[in-house]
Amino acid sequence: MKTFLKTVDNEVLRQKKLSDEKQPTKPEVRNALNDAECKTEFLRPMPGADRMYPETDLPLLKISRDLINECKKNLPKLKSEQEEDLKKTGLNHEMIKLLISENKVEEFKVLLDVYKNPNFISKMILLFPKEISSKTGRNLDEIENKFSDNYFEILNELNKKKISESDIKEILIKLAEGKSFDDAIKIEKADNSEIEEKILDIIKAKPGLNANAYMGLVMSQMKNKINGKEAMEIINKLMK
C-alpha cells in the first residue's frame, strides 16, 4: 500500500512539474515501475474518439505502393459510378435503383453481353421473378436461383429467333413449376393462316372497335401463340 501511495505522490509531483514548466501534455497510459523510486514509465497514447492508437507490441507493417494499386483495381465501384454506367445503357432511373438495391448490376451486365436489350434484360431479372412468385405462390429466392441458372440459355434461344421476347414469361413460369429447360423452351406456335383466320373471326365478332381493342382480345384469346408486334401487323392489315 505504501508503495502504491508513493507512486501516486510521485506522479502528482511529475504532473505539477510539467504544469509549472508549461510543457504541453497529451493523454497517455503509464506503467507503475516496481522499483525503489516508485516512478512510472510511458506505455502508449490514450485512445481518442475513434479508439485508435499505435500498437506498441507489434512492428509497423509496411505496404508497398504496388500492392495498394493492385487492391484498388479490385475495389467495387461506388453507387454513383454504377449509376453513371447504367445510365449509358438507356435504363430509366427506377430500373437503375432496383438493379443496385437488389445487387444485380453484374448479372445485368453479363446478360446484356448476350442479348442487347437493356430494358428487357432488366425486366426479366427484376420484375418477372416477382410476378411469377406472386402468381404461382412459390418462394421468390428459389425462383430467382432457378431462373439465374437458365437466363443465359434462354437469351441464346432468343438470339437464334427460336423464341420471342413475349415467350419468355411463359418459359419462366414452366421452369418455376419444375419443368426441365428442354420442356419449358417448347412453345406452341400457330401457323400464319390459322392466326389470320382467328384474328379475322375476332374482328367480325366485335365490329367497330379500334386496333388496340382488337389487340387486347387477340392477345387474351391466343395467349403466347403470337407476339404483340405480329398481332398488330395482322390486325392493321385486316382492318384496311
Image (tube, rainbow, N blue to C red):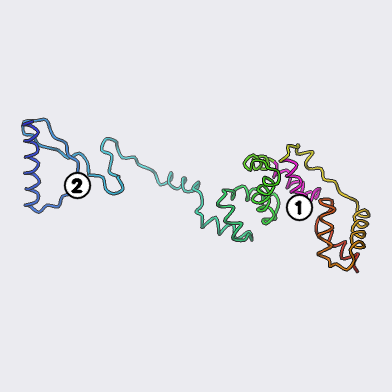
Q: Residues within 10 Å of mark 2 (few under 14, many from 20)?
A: few
Which quadrant holds residue 238?
bottom right
- Find residue 204 and report its horizontal and vertical position in percent: 92, 62
Mark 2 and mark 1 residues within 8 Å of each other at the beta carbon: no
* Disc 1: which residue: 165
Amino acid on which disc 1 is placed: Glu
Stretch of the chain drawn in magenta? 150-175
Is 213 in the magenta? Answer: no
Is 168 in the magenta? Answer: yes
Indicate whether 213 appears above or below 147: below
Q: Residues within 10 Å of mark 1 (few under 14, many from 20)?
A: some
* Number of marks drawn: 2
Q: Residue at x 55, y 59 (%)?
A: 84
Amino acid on which disc 2 is placed: Pro
* Disc 2: which residue: 27
Q: Residue at x 84, y 51 (%)?
A: 225
Of 217 and 35, nearer the camera is 217
Magenta-colored segment: predominant secondary structure: helix
Secondary structure type for disc 1: helix
